[in-house]
Image (cartoon, rainbow, N blue to C red):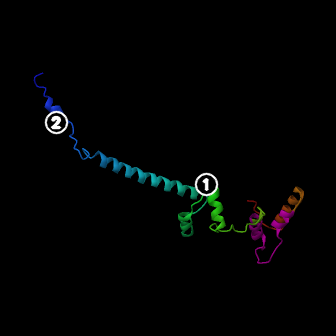
Amino acid sequence: MDEYDDDEQEDQQPQRTRNGGDGWRKKLEADNEQLRAQNAAGAAAIRELAFVKAGVDINDPRAEYFVKGYDGDLTADAIKAKAETIGLFAAPAASNTDPNAESIQRMHEATSTSGRGVPSVNWAQKIYEATTPEEVKQLAEQAAAAGAKLSFE
């Protein structure tokens, strides 16, 4: 027990000076600055995600100014509505209202010539316009008899 020295424990404790001790204030300020930077990065990520959810291509140069200048509500609906009013979204291409038009076109192209460059009957259109299953079957048999190659994809 004689080896125990009170002075030795006092030497292990950091000595604080009147000006702030061992830099605890600088450490707090550095931590605060780091947290503020992380908060700003998180807010920017949330904002960017809102624009992506609204369907805005954030890599489009036209959208860059919109994203920077937008100060409205950060919901997808609000962003999309504003983007549409300024014409940011391209008008959708005029689509054919007939879902079978592409198939009919392919069938027409496949059966439009009889191999000799002579136009033949448009079997695809006739089959499409048929009103009963019996009529479809009859037209398909006629097309097969005429040598037309029909593809139902």
As drawn, the residue found furthest toward the front would be 18
Side of 6 relative to 52 (left or right): left
From the image, give the main secondary structure of the stretch colored magenta.
helix
Helix, strand or loop status at disc 1 = loop
* Above or below 25: residue 129: below
Task: Give coordinates of residue 136: x percent, y percent.
Answer: 86, 59
Quarter the C terminus occupies: bottom right
Task: Give coordinates of residue 43: x percent, y percent.
Answer: 49, 54
Quarter the N terminus occupies: top left
**The disc labelled 1 sits on which kind of residue?**
Thr
As drawn, the residue found furthest toward the top would be 1
**Residue holding disc 2:** 11
Residue occupying image coordinates x 45% and y 55%: 41
Image quadrant of residue 107? bottom right
Of residue 146 and residue 128, the one placed in the foreground of this image is: 128
Task: Give coordinates of residue 62: x percent, y percent.
Answer: 56, 69
Q: Is residue 16 visible?
A: yes
Q: Residues within 10 Å of mark 1 (few under 14, many from 20)?
A: few
- Which dot marks residue 75? 1
Side of 115 relative to 21 (left or right): right
Residue occupying image coordinates x 86% and y 58%: 137
Q: Residues within 10 Å of mark 2 (few under 14, many from 20)?
A: few
Magenta residue span: 102-129
Sequence-wise, the earlier of marks 1 and 2 is 2
Task: Give coordinates of residue 74: x percent, y percent.
Answer: 58, 56
Side of 85 relative to 113 (left or right): left
In 3D space, how far apart are the residues under numbered discs 1 and 2 (Cα atoms)?
59 Å
**The disc labelled 2 sits on which kind of residue?**
Asp
Image quadrant of residue 16? top left
Residue occupying image coordinates x 34% and y 47%: 28
